[in-house]
Image (cartoon, helix red, strand yellow):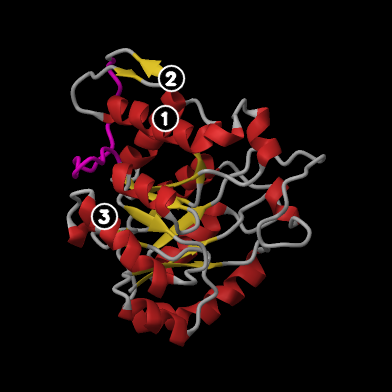
Amino acid sequence: MRIAVTIFLTDETITPVRLARELEQRGFAGLYLPEHTHIPVERTSPYPAGGELPREYGRTLDPFVALGQAAAVTERLGLGTGITLAAQHDPIDLAKQVATLDHLSGGRFTLGLGFGWNVEEAADHGVEWRTRRELVRDRMGLMRALWTEEPTAYEGEFGSVRASFAHPKPVRKPRGPVVGPRTLVGGAAGPKLFSSICEYADGWLPIGGRGLTESLPALRTAWAEAGRDPGALQVVPYAVLPGAGKLAHFAELGIEEVVVQLPPEGEAEVLRVLDAYQQFVDGAGGGDGADGRGA
């Protein structure tokens, strides 16, 4: 099992460069970063975990800039977003960012996608909340057109692009309906989410990994009914607080990668937690990139 990490990197935490170097030296498989462009002060959207919204949500670094720094000082470390709020991006710009990072890192990038929870943040980007899932689907279609080898036009409900020269291309070859880097969709289990995963992704980023014993069979059934290769489905529990028993349970379910949570702290505290997590990396045999195939 590969052990990757996620952290809210901010202007107050350990730096991307320092963290990335430490992770690669220690044998961790990858670094995934979340995204929030801003957090409106006047907010009615409740924090999904309950209670007050933690300070780091309003201070996150741009994940693509931070991961670019991480890519420049590593050779094997997987790099990913957890998650990119695709509805809040211009898809032509996002396609270029994703392809460039994937190209410069030698194919180490994983695009973790999500639909968001903060209504006010999304509204400032012009996102209509009730259609955000359809918007993300549409933007993925447009980005796939730009990532396709031959110039390909796209006409969607929310956007379009002419057949265009758009380089670089993501490193990975198309697989089934998926074009672009490894793509995982985050969100709570359910038919709508599983439909999205089967249509345009390689797998699922379930937050915390609870309830997988019950939900995985439903996802695998939807995956098979969509005509996808059963052996290609990837499920990566995300933001996990690890324990030996929990990781063993994931392994029994056939899970090959887990993303563990680091605290949004300075260098000393982050390195202390990495020391504590080292047992899981050593026990799992280390990692060689976000997909197990290295760079």
Q: Residues within 10 Å of mark 1 (few under 14, many from 20)?
A: many
Segment tinted magenta in the rendering: 164-180
Labels 2 & 1 near each other (Cβ < 8 A): yes
Q: Which of the two marks, 2 or 3, is nearer to us in this view?
A: 3
Separation of marks 1 and 3 at Cα, in angstroms: 21 Å
Amino acid carrying label 1: it is Arg
Disc on res. 223: 3
Separation of marks 2 and 3 at Cα, in angstroms: 27 Å
Q: Residues within 10 Å of mark 3 (few under 14, many from 20)?
A: many
- Residue position for label 2: 159
| Left or right: residue 118 compared with residue 242 | right
Amino acid carrying label 2: it is Gly
- Residue position for label 1: 139
Name the quarter where the N terminus is drawn.
bottom left
Residue sitting at x 63%, y 35%: 122
| Residue 108 horizontal/vertical position (percent) | 33, 50
Camera-nearest residue between 277 and 133: 133
